[in-house]
Structures are given as structure tokens and as C-alpha cells.
Image (cartoon, helix red, strand yellow):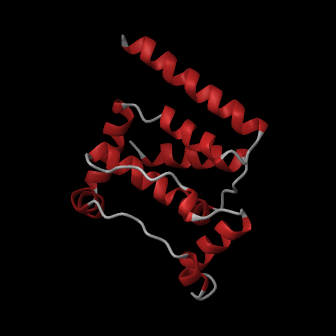
Amino acid sequence: MGKTKLKLVTLAKAVVAYAKIVRDPNQLAEVFALADSLSEPTVMDRISRSFRREPAGASAIAERRRVDVDLAELDALPEGTLGKTYAKFMRDNGLTPEALPSLEGSDEHEYIRAHLYETHDMWHAVTGFGADVSGELGLQGFYAAQVD
């Protein structure tokens, strides 16, 4: 398949996922379908290079640690902490860490994709973007701005 055709297929998948999210912003699966449609190898290579530029990012890729969240523990943290803010975001939006798809992380691209899934809602808490359509699109824009 040529690069142009691949890009058109990728764009079509993104548009379909976006349309489904606009109709029903509570479709978590479509949020991840939109993210997946933008996870082609060239994009993942750019993200990987961006991670590796920073020592903490390079270390994360090498160690491939996974995120394991206990909302009850985070609820016990002081107000204003990231953990407490994240737990509140999750509860306010009826979300649980268990609802996130569990992805393999056997190679670098898979690990980064899994990490992005696992930290997606944390980034909502950090950036202040809501769980609605505009918040999801804003967060995707935030992600894109982090990769050069």
C-alpha cells in the first residue's frame, strides 16, 4: 500500500472515530479509536524520538514500567495533588482505570502506545481539558504539540 493511500485510510479512520465521538462523547472506545488511527509507524517514531531526548523518557522506554492506579489511595491524598485531582476527574466522569483497554508493551511502539492509554486521563487532570468532545480534541492537540 502506498504512503498516500495509507494516509487516506488513516485520515478516514480518524474522521469516522471523530464523528462517533461528536454524536456521543461518552464512547470511550471511539476516543481510543481516534488515537489509534493516528498511531501509524511514522508518528510513533516521532514520539519515540521525542521520549528518548529526555533522560526520564529514555529510562521509561528502557524499563517499560506500567501504570497501576488505585483510586481509593489517590482519594486519600491532600487537595491540590495530582493524585487527588486525577481521582476526582475519574469519579466526576464515571471512569475507572479498569475501563481502559490493556495493551501489550512488547516493543517500543507498543509500550509507548500502552503508556499513552494508561496516562490519558491523567493528562486530562494535568491540562484541565474535560472529558467532552472539545476536551478530547484539545488533549489530542496537546499531545501533538509535545512531539517535534
Q: Name the quadrant containing residue 68.
A: bottom left
Task: Please state if 80 lies on the left or on the right of 51 as rendered.
Answer: right
Q: How many marks?
A: 0
Task: Please state if 121 lies on the left or on the right of 47 as rendered.
Answer: right
Task: Specify the farthest residue to the left.
Answer: 62
Q: Residue at x 58, y 57 (%)?
A: 99
Task: Please state if 133 lies on the left or on the right of 5 as rendered.
Answer: right
Q: Name the quadrant containing residue 45.
A: top left
Q: Name the quadrant containing residue 72.
A: bottom right
**Location of residue 26 in the rendering, given as x and y in whole percent from the top left corner:** 72, 48
Task: Please state if 79 lies on the left or on the right of 97 as rendered.
Answer: right
**Location of residue 43 in the rendering, given as x and y in whole percent from the top left corner:** 39, 35
**Location of residue 113 in the rendering, given as x and y in whole percent from the top left corner:** 40, 47
Q: Residue at x 64, y 43 (%)?
A: 137
**Location of residue 144 in the rendering, given as x and y in whole percent from the top left corner:** 49, 43
Q: Residue at x 54, y 83 (%)?
A: 73
Quarter containing the N terminus: top left
Query: Eyeballing the image, is 1 above or below 25?
Result: above
Q: Residue at x 55, y 64 (%)?
A: 97
Quarter containing the C terminus: top left
Nearest the viewer among 100 and 144 is 100
